[in-house]
Image (cartoon, coloured by chain):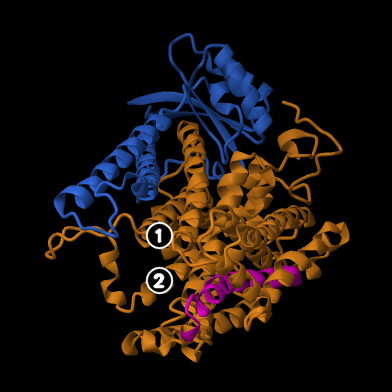
Amino acid sequence: MAEICSPLRLPLIAGRKKPAAVTEDVCRALTRPPSGLWWAAFAAAFALLLLGTAAVSYQIATGVGTWGLNTTVGWAFDITNFVFWVGIGHAGTLISAILFLFRQRWRTSVNRSAEAMTLFAVMCAGIFPVIHTGRPWLAYWLFPYPNFRGSLWINFRSPLAWDCFAISTYFLISATFWYVGLIPDLATVRDRLASTEGGSLRHRLFSIFSLGWNGSYRVWRHYEVLYLLLAGLATPLVISVHTIVSWDFATAVIPGWHATIFPPYFVAGAIFSGIAMVLTLMLVARKAMGLEDYITTRHVDVMCKLLLLTSGIVALAYGTEFFTAFYSGNPYEEFVFLNRAKGPFAWAYWTMVSCNVLVPQLLWFRRVRRSMGVVFVLSLLINVGMWFERFVIIVTSLHRDFLPSSWASYRPTIVEVSTLAGSFGLFFTCFLIFCRILPVIAMGEVKAVLSHGQGNGGEA
Amino acid sequence: MSRRVLIGIFESEDAILDVTAEARRRGFTIVDVFAPYAVHGLDKAMGLERSRLPWVCFLLGLTGAGFKVWFEYWTTASDWPINVGGKPWNSLPAFVPITFEVMVLFAGLSTVLAFFGMSRLWPGRKAALLDPRVTNDRFALVLEESDAAFDVGAVERFLREHEAVRVEEREQEVAR
């Protein structure tokens, strides 16, 4: 069957590889000893994780009073971090599910690691509301279960209860989707290990988790449908998750939060920040692990275009918020937005605008999109900007409320900063371990697109 | 059940697609095809019927959603009603988000479990590999020697003509 060949269809994978070469390239990283660079990164990430663990232990033992919150600013750093991390996760689902439904076949090179990133980011996100409850050992009260207090059920009208269900479902479905995608690759690794270290603990673990996969097409047929169904479920799920996160704010009557624009604004922002994080990780991973043939400049280029699109949506949301505040004629709304741009947190607001709206405009230039160093710096700046977006939304809306006598300011304590650092530690520790023990590229999917744009079918 | 089968090993997806479609056209009994990745169109070439997994997904999703609406109504309006800000006991619109999440959860997890069941995959199951490279870069077509009219020599020639790199005859357990 001749593959359609057009000069417009560039190869997705460089180096005219054969399937066996893909297995070899991806699995090599699993068997060779870790490099000095990996150990250095792991030591740094693990140190941050320990710092965060110490901070969280201290604040659980002492109480939420160790944070810089006051009666006016009751939500600040903690919820900022929560929304930030949930948002990071969303790019993984965009790449694994939404781009799958849109038949964007370039996604195969990055979907495995982007989905892993989703899982780790949601784990980081989950920590924050749990410690914010103040008594995290009672966090299971968030779920409805028959209890001896009545049974007294949770309030299903509360966005916080919605959030709890949304995040848990998102984690479970993402984990399942990721695992299902891994099964054929686990079998590939299992059969490769059988020849070199058959019977070893690692070989046995891969045998257990690959569930006896043998490549039978009677199974592949169901597998393909399953993958499509999970993608179809994950797509509305990811939109629902950040919509519900935005409702944590939008259902309140606080000026600056009470806006119908919030769901699309948050979903676009989430995907924007998530793609920036995918780029940050991928640019490092492709260099460190020698995956330049798989994650090519073309992949980076396409993701930069997605950044540009989502940056545009976010910019539109910023503008719309301001316009609505003035057009509404509501003095409280007007005040909140002027206070954002000119008040004590103006520096945070303008950091957000510069990083999220101005800096990404550089991506209009092809030369910028193809220059890995510049893209790396841009992706870091966007991550900073998106963190500040959540900080601005939360803190500037709260710190000057309706009653000037209760106006207050907010500054994070060392405990809060350490907790944020710790969440980065957890994220990178998990990611670095993942790079060592599982195939970071979805081999089964990449092999299917090898012939793409090569002109001579599977023999490419 | 043990049967005699003829196995052809192939190196490219084009070859496996061609030979599978041709084998079916000639009326051979295709026991299975083994592939390292999903090849577009191979299920059609084998003549497999469509997977019924979407039904599991739809029905279990519906069950999850139905159960959750009932549960939210029962807890909030019947078992222990609490007045929250004067909102109605049965706040149906506010129940929508969790109902949606539970629907997705039920549909997703049950479809995966159904897939494991239908495909007989479970932790610790020993993989019956036709060729050690079938999860790497080789494809295998397994034909059943169904009756006396099955001419092994002719079929082997047919497989070789379609770029088979190896052909072998085996006695094996065949699960349908």
The secondary element bearing badge 2 is classed as: helix
Does residue A291 appear to the left or right of A134 in the view shown? right
Residue A401 within the magenta-colored segment of the rendering? yes
Determine if residue A182 is in view.
no
**Crowd band around label 1 with a 10 angstrom C-alpha radius: few (<14), some (14–19), many (20+):** many
Determine if residue A305 is in view.
yes
Colour chain A is painted in:
orange
Is B34 situated above or below B18? below
Does residue A390 appear to the left or right of A13 in the view shown? left
Q: Which residue lies furthest to the top in this view?
A: B149
* Residue at image point 60% right, 27% down: B41
Where residue B55 appears, as percent x and y from the top left, is: 38, 29
* Residue at image point 74% right, 47% down: A12
**Quick one: which chain is blue?**
B
Magenta range: A376-405
Q: Which of marks 1 and 2 is nearer the N terminus?
A: 2
Which quadrant, please, contains the C terminus of chain A?
top right
| Three-letter amino acid code of the residue under disc 1 | Asp
- The reply to whether discs 1 and 2 touch (Cβ–Cβ < 8 Å) is yes
What secondary structure predominates along the stretch shown in magenta? helix
| Three-letter amino acid code of the residue under disc 2 | Pro
Residue receiving disc 1: A163
* Residue at image point 71% right, 43% down: A450
Residue receiving disc 2: A129
Where residue A365 appears, as percent x and y from the top left, is: 86, 59
